[in-house]
Image: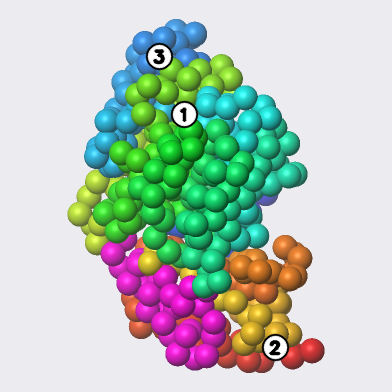
């Protein structure tokens, strides 16, 4: 036991002493931790409130129902919500299982362009089970809605996915929905990254447009590591049964409790103000990199992250080199492929930078600008060959 708690303490020290710029990470509140570390981990509750396979579920029934209602409030929606997914990938696989048959076509953004593994990478189960087609980015790095339309006509997908892991611009869910529905497809919005912005009104909402919406709860929502699935009421039964018994056994009730706390926090004015600061900070930092001569993909950002592309400005420098150099100086970020990437995913020609985590720690624009200068100094000290 000592060993485990010593490692936890070391990780706590690491988190306290590094500048965290990974766009998918954040720092949760004490209350989220308390709920996740509670006695609810002891409870089996296969099924749904009022329809469980075990006794003693009266408290967890109330908790799950409360959690569901709070998340509907967060997104001001009457969509059905399932709060049992364990992670973003689990939520996405469940969404596909609910709406598709193996072999059906999914149209999504390629991982190399900013998509996610669970959007159909060949080595993921999602890529093995379904026929995956991709739309692309335009020359500036924006999602090319013309290519979404062309590919939808050409490939006649059953499902189109609007959502990304490394994309810094507004996603036009309304237009995606129009294209999907005109071509007989359903639209799934994966808002894992931008959910906090959607909740705070800083990004247009997919509710009312997408047929099914998945999200993680641990990125800009600043909550427990977990996920949610929302869907139009007509797909509620399919989604619920795809999750249990289709893709899971007992729900993690301790995580559902922590997700309820996450929702309560997302409903506060403080959270809205926090998200506004996250976006302001991201814009300020991206603008500073541009001023220093770096290439920011699309020239800027509308959300909590942006990508630096070294291809033209620092042709001998890779994302991997920058990630490693920063790691040793207590700045954490991740290498990332850039549009038109020529290097392997292990090397890449860019890095992804996010402001959600350090904004939680109280960083403002000036702090992020200072970090941009520090990163520039470290990049300038790298060997050029
Ligand atoms: C767009 C998107 N969807 C899904 C996921 C998967 O989330 P998880 O890591 O919880 O499986 C991620 C994670 O980075 C993501 O960026």
- Residue farthest to the right, as pictured: 385
Does the magenta portion include 303? no
Can residue 199 be seen in the rendering of this structure?
yes
Q: CA distance from mark 1 to mark 2?
A: 46 Å
Q: Which residue is mark 3?
A: 57
Foreground: 137 or 184? 184
> Which label belongs to residue 84?
1
Where disc 3 sits, the SS reads loop
Label 1: which secondary element: loop
Q: Is mark 3 within 8 Å of ligand 1?
A: no
Q: Residues within 10 Å of mark 2 (few under 14, many from 20)?
A: few
Secondary structure, magenta segment, majority class? helix
Residue name at image x 62 percent, y 69 percent: 338
Could you tell me residue 189's position as x and y percent? 45, 43
Relative to 312, is 253 on the left or the right?
Answer: left
Find disc 2 in the rendering and name its residue.
382
Image: magenta residue range? 274-301
Q: Residue at x 75, y 70 (%)?
A: 343
Q: Is residue 36 visible to the viewer in this orientation of the structure?
A: no
Residue 356 % position (x, y): 41, 63
Q: Earlier in the sequence, mark 1 or mark 3?
A: 3
The span from disc 1 to disc 3 (Cα, nearest Å) is 15 Å
Asked if residue 338 is positioned above or below residue 197 in the image, the reply reads below
Q: Earlier in the sequence, mark 3 or mark 2?
A: 3
Compare marks 1 and 2 and give the one earlier in the sequence: 1
Q: Decide: is 155 above or below 378.
A: above
Please determine whether, in this image, residue 369 is positioned above or below residue 245: below
Residue at image coords 43%, 37%? 181
Indicate the position of residue 366 as horizontal and vertical percent values.
36, 83
| Closest to the observer, 7 or 276 | 276
């Amino acid at each position: 036991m000592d060993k485990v708690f010593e490692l936890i303490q070391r990780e706590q020290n690491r988190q306290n002493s590094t500048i965290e710029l990974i766009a998918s990470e954040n720092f949760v509140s004490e209350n989220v931790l308390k709920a996740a570390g509670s006695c609810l981990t002891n409870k089996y509750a296969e099924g749904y409130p009022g329809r469980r396979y075990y006794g003693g579920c009266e408290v967890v029934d109330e908790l799950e129902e409360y959690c569901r209602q709070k998340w509907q409030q967060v997104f001001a929606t009457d969509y059905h919500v399932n709060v049992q997914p364990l992670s973003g990938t689990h939520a996405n696989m469940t969404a596909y299982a609910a709406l598709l048959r193996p072999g059906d076509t999914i149209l999504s953004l390629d991982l190399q362009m900013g998509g996610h593994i669970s959007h159909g990478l060949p080595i993921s189960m999602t890529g093995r089970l379904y026929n995956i087609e991709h739309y692309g980015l335009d020359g500036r790095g924006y999602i090319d809605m013309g290519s979404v339309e062309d590919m939808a006509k050409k490939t006649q997908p059953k499902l189109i996915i609007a959502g990304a892991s490394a994309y810094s611009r507004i996603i036009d869910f309304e237009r995606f929905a129009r294209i999907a529905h005109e071509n007989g497809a359903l639209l799934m919005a994966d808002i894992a990254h931008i959910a906090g912005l959607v909740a705070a009104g800083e990004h247009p909402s997919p509710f009312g447009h997408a047929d099914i919406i998945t999200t993680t709860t641990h990125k800009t929502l600043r909550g427990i590591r977990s996920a949610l699935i929302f869907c139009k009421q007509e797909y509620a039964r399919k989604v619920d049964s795809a999750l249990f018994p289709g893709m899971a056994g007992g729900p993690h009730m301790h995580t559902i409790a922590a997700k309820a706390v996450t929702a309560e926090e997302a409903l506060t004015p403080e959270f809205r103000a926090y998200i506004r600061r996250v976006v302001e900070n991201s814009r300020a930092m991206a603008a500073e990199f541009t001023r220093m001569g770096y290439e920011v993909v699309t020239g800027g950002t509308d959300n909590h992250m942006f990508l630096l592309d070294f291809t033209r400005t620092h042709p001998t420098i890779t994302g991997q080199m920058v990630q490693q150099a920063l790691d040793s100086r207590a700045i954490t970020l991740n290498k990332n492929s850039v549009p038109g990437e020529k290097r392997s995913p292990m090397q890449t020609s860019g890095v992804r930078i996010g402001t959600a985590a350090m904004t939680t720690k109280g960083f403002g624009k000036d702090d992020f600008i200072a970090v941009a200068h520090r990163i520039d100094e470290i990049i300038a000290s790298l060997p050029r060959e």
